[in-house]
Amino acid sequence: MRLSPLREFALKALLWLPLSFVCWFVLAPLLVWPVGVAARAILVGVWPDLFSGLVQGGQAIDHAGQVLGHADYLLDITTTVLVRADEGGRVGLGVLETTVNPMVYGYALPLFSGLTLATPMPVRRRLLQLAAAFAVIWLAQSFGVVAESIKIVAFQSGAPGVAATQRAGLEPNVIALAYQFGYLILPALVPVALWVGFNRTFIESLVGPPGEPGDRKQSLSHVE
């Protein structure tokens, strides 16, 4: 029995999506590298009074503060914010360092890849779509990393962080909105919007072009 185009696409998507997520996780350090480069350029270039550096690779820590091991996909960010440290009864000053997980903003990559691999098209066109989409998704992922980094300084670093963001002219409401937009909306919206925009003809072949039900109704009325 031959499957309908819609069911065939759904079956292929169910097969490609899990494989895409596995490949995304295995290749995480490589796929995160462009995000780290862009985020470093933005943080250090735009807000040099807040951030002094970013390196890829860091320690994975659970909610209890226990070190789980080294993860090459994490981003270690160094700020210029001075904080007071109390360790073993010794009090001193140090700069705030934080670790950001860019993977929480990057699941758009395997989502778009799975949908694109399930869509029938020539190999050249598929590669062009993947290249264009990855560039856009990396920018959206970098936005999330930048927004989270500023959010940590502004809301999780105490009075020194608040003072530093105020000196930089950053409004708390804008920081919170940017973080929520980068965390909640962009990772889910960008891959679907890109796939729909790139493959509108194929989608119309599955569900029918806009206005088709109305056209049928008008035709039936004309016949009556």
Image: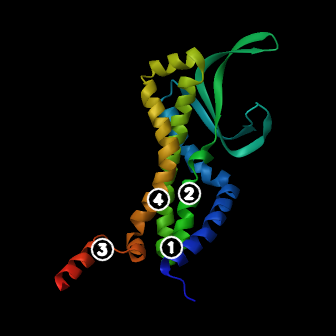
Mark positioned earlier in the residue sequence (1 or 3) = 1
User: What secondary structure is marked by label 4?
Assistant: helix
Q: In the displayed structure, does residue 65 sit left or right of residue 183?
A: right
Q: Residue furthest right?
A: 88
User: What secondary structure is marked by label 3?
Assistant: helix
Name the residue tied to disc 2: 109
Q: Amino acid at mark 4?
A: Val
**CA distance separating discs 2 and 1:** 16 Å
Q: In the displayed structure, does residue 159 sit left or right of residue 220?
A: right
Mark positioned earlier in the residue sequence (3 or 2) = 2
Mark positioned earlier in the residue sequence (4 or 3) = 4
Query: For the residues carrying marks 2 and 4, which lies nearer the camera in this image?
Result: 4
Name the residue tied to disc 3: 213
- Asked if residue 14 is positioned above or below residue 154 in the image, the reply reads below
**CA distance separating discs 2 and 4:** 11 Å
On the image, the x and y values in percent for residue 53 come to 59, 33
Label 3 CA crowd tier, 10 Å (few <14, some 14–19, many 20+): few
User: In percent of the image, x 82 and y 14: which residue is there?
Assistant: 88
Quadrant in which the N terminus is drawn: bottom right
**CA distance separating discs 3 and 2:** 35 Å
**Visible in this render: residue 136?**
no
Q: Amino acid at mark 1?
A: Thr
On the image, the x and y values in percent for residue 182 come to 49, 42
